[in-house]
Image: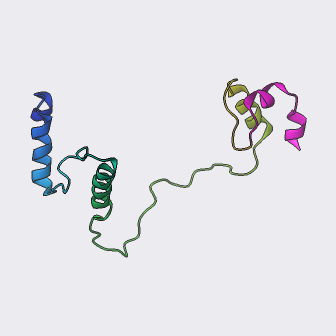
Amino acid sequence: MEGCYSSNQRMQGWNLVREISGSKSSCPNQNDGDAAEDRVDCWCCHFKGLLENPPPVEDVDDEIEPVFQDLPIDDGPFTMEEYRVAKRSMKAGKSGGDDGVVPEVLKWVLIDDLVQH
């Protein structure tokens, strides 16, 4: 596979992958098709094939261990120091968040006392 990539024979490499994996494409080329509907059907077929074949699970009852340990992260209300750090890092000219408040309002209008309560 690496030899195919380094010698610019990528198609031959993909053919090797298809041969090893046993996957056959039902659409020879995802871009083939005269109409947009044909191309959409090809892509739909492609993704349907990817998503309908989940990997086999050996033992469904096995407990999955957590990847990360519990970290001491405070998920309560933010502190004024966190607010000030966030306020300093805001850049002017950016769009507002979900609440519609643009960064300039939080940065330059003196509303720290309102946020504190």
Question: How many callouts does the rendering have?
Answer: 0
Q: In the visual, does 69 lie left or right of 38?
A: right
Q: In the visual, does 59 lie left or right of 32?
A: right
Identify the main secondary structure in magenta. Answer: helix
Quarter of the figure that contains the N terminus: top left
Q: Can you give x and y, in whole percent of width and height, for residue 67 in the image?
A: 44, 55
Q: Give the residue furthest to the front.
A: 35
Quarter of the figure that contains the C terminus: top right
Q: Give the residue furthest to the bottom.
A: 61
Q: Residue at x 17, y 50 (%)?
A: 28
The colour scheme applied to this rendered structure is: rainbow
Q: In the visual, does 52 lie left or right of 77?
A: left
In this picture, which residue range is highlighted in magenta?
Answer: 100-117
Q: Is residue 36 magenta?
A: no
User: Which one is nearer the viewer's eye here, 31 or 59?
Assistant: 31
The answer, for residue 67, to whether it is visible in the render is yes
The answer, for residue 1, to whether it is visible in the render is no
Q: Can you give x and y, in whole percent of width and height, for residue 51 in the image?
A: 33, 61
Q: In which quarter of the view is residue 116 placed?
A: top right
The image shows residue 45, relative to residue 74, as above or below, that is below
Q: Residue at x 25, y 46 (%)?
A: 34
Q: Does the magenta stretch include residue 107?
A: yes
Q: In which quarter of the view is residue 89 placed?
A: top right
Q: Can you give x and y, in whole percent of width and height, for residue 54 in the image?
A: 30, 65
User: Which one is nearer the viewer's eye here, 95 or 1?
Assistant: 95
Q: In the visual, does 48 lie left or right of 109?
A: left
Q: Residue at x 37, y 72 (%)?
A: 62
User: Which one is nearer the viewer's eye here, 37 or 102?
Assistant: 37
